[in-house]
Image (cartoon, coloured by chain):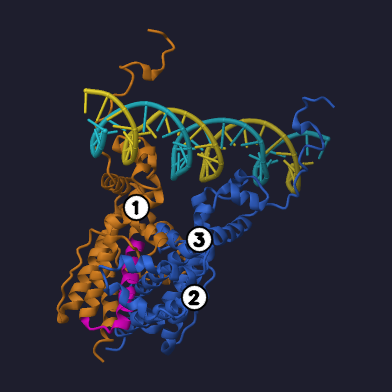
Chain colours: A blue, B orange, C cyan, D yellow
Amino acid sequence: MPADEKPTASVWTRPRPRQREHLTREQIVAEAIRLLDAEGVEELSMRKLGTRLGTAATSLYRHVASRDELIELVVDDVYGEPDVPTAVDRTRWREAVTRSATELRAMTLRHPWIAPELGQVGLVHIGPNAMRMSSALLAQFEAAGFPADEMDRAMSTLMAYVIGMATAEAAYLSLITRSGKTEQEWVAGLRPAFDEATREHPRLRAGSSAQQDVHPKRIRDDNFAYGLDRVLDGLAARLTP
Amino acid sequence: MPADEKPTASVWTRPRPRQREHLTREQIVAEAIRLLDAEGVEELSMRKLGTRLGTAATSLYRHVASRDELIELVVDDVYGEPDVPTAVDRTRWREAVTRSATELRAMTLRHPWIAPELGQVGLVHIGPNAMRMSSALLAQFEAAGFPADEMDRAMSTLMAYVIGMATAEAAYLSLITRSGKTEQEWVAGLRPAFDEATREHPRLRAGSSAQQDVHPKRIRDDNFAYGLDRVLDGLAARLTP
DNA sequence: CTTCGATGCGAACACTGTACGCATGACGTA
DNA sequence: TACGTCATGCGTACAGTGTTCGCATCGAAG
């Protein structure tokens, strides 16, 4: 065997032709979501994703135009998760909307990395799942009795609240995850710095110190429910004059 | 003159010692904001920013620990822009809050790149400007008569709505800016694709086609005002039972 | 068996954030 | 005036990024 043989010349060194069960866009998106959930958005690189899928990074470009497009696909895929009620009867629209809002929040908390993307791609997505979701949500406001020219403003109001709130929570939880501590440890550890920073703004301290012992997750759930109720109160007032 | 002389050996090739008017953190932040406004967040690189300031990229690290920290500084600096009323009398809290919300939205629209950052850093910032702003806003809810344990929930509700709405708008406007067209051209150009995409969800088309001739900016302003009024209605209902 | 389009992939390019170490300036002290 | 010290600027380098290109190889169709 000559020493200078090219690597591809030997049957042994040449990589076995891989089992050609074709790489699909769906597999790529699914694995990307797994990677994003595990490591966050800035740890998603094409090479790392390729490795996880057992392919070279550049192979991904046969199925996806760019990293940005991949993220668009990933976002729309996640939009397929929330289970928003479709058929609604007139008297229970508020239940349905509450349920939808809760599902959307849960979606964002399951995938905290999605929040900044929503801020980059916008809240109006044209992916199929996002459209299905929006359409179903809009149907709920229609069933509630909102006139046609007010329906989408009502929906935007709700969506803005939900996304805004969930974004704040997601960012907060991402920080904690990156720090490697539990939420309670993290809160406790930050308290001195927080007290120091709020020395000049004692008002900001009032609300949080009252609930010092309550489980943080409970607080967040309550906060979300409180605001959601206020928003729905305000919207409902438009229906019964 | 020997041919192999090192560049630093000659008085002529050696760069003149630069006028040492020290680079400051303030200058860096200010120039970063200018660059971000002009080119967006992913065009902000340390080298490009250095060039604009007439320094080497690595010099920036004497004043700023990392790119991420720079962005934190930049975000807090922008939080210094909105003019939120501080002293409020009991009967006019709603005016004050409306004014604050409008200022916050304007801030986000002036600097659309800030929206994704809010989703990454969180809505609760510990920068001095962000804290001053939060404190002033909270004072308005206090003046309105919200009990201490409800004040910050009310504020969070409002902030979530404002940030959510402004984020959506900012993302939308960023897209348009990047396309190089005016908002009206862009809307018109996208209409066919939109109609195609909404073929299966005709509900989504209803609201937008009704306002086809209205100036888009007007629509956005109205949408924001509508939702803000609903949120404030819902909050106000807690004060006068 | 041959041909052909679709797919995987190695190499390369331009670019990124940032660590390191050296040079140079300004400044307090002798 | 001379020296030492410290903060600052910056050239170099490294590991990593997204993406393009061209070649190799495959499955299926003719």
Residue B80, position as x, y percentages in the image: 24, 59
**Toward the viewer: A58 or D22?**
A58
Q: Which of the image's four quarters has the N terminus of chain B?
A: top left
The numbered disc on residue A178 is 3
Amino acid type, mark 3: Arg
Q: Which of the image's four quarters has the C terminus of chain B?
A: bottom left
- Provide the secondary structure element on which disc 1 rests: helix
Amino acid type, mark 1: Ile
Residue at figure coordinates x 35%, y 67% from the top left = A194
Inspect the magenta stretch and tell me whether residue B158 lies in it: yes
Nearest-to-viewer mark from 2 and 1: 2
Q: Residue furthest top?
A: B1
State whether the magenta stretch is mostly helix, strand or loop.
Answer: helix
Q: Is residue B216 visible?
A: no
Residue located beneath label 1 in the image: B176
Task: Say whether residue A59 is left or right of residue A161.
Answer: right
Amino acid type, mark 2: Glu
The numbered disc on residue A121 is none
- Provide the secondary structure element on which disc 3 rests: helix
Q: Is residue B92 visible?
A: yes
State if disc 1 and disc 3 touch (CB < 8 Å): no
Tell me which segment is drawn in magenta.
B144-169
Residue at figure coordinates x 69%, y 52% from the top left = A22
Residue at figure coordinates x 76%, y 49% from the top left = A19
Measure the C-alpha gap from mark 3 to mark 1.
34 Å
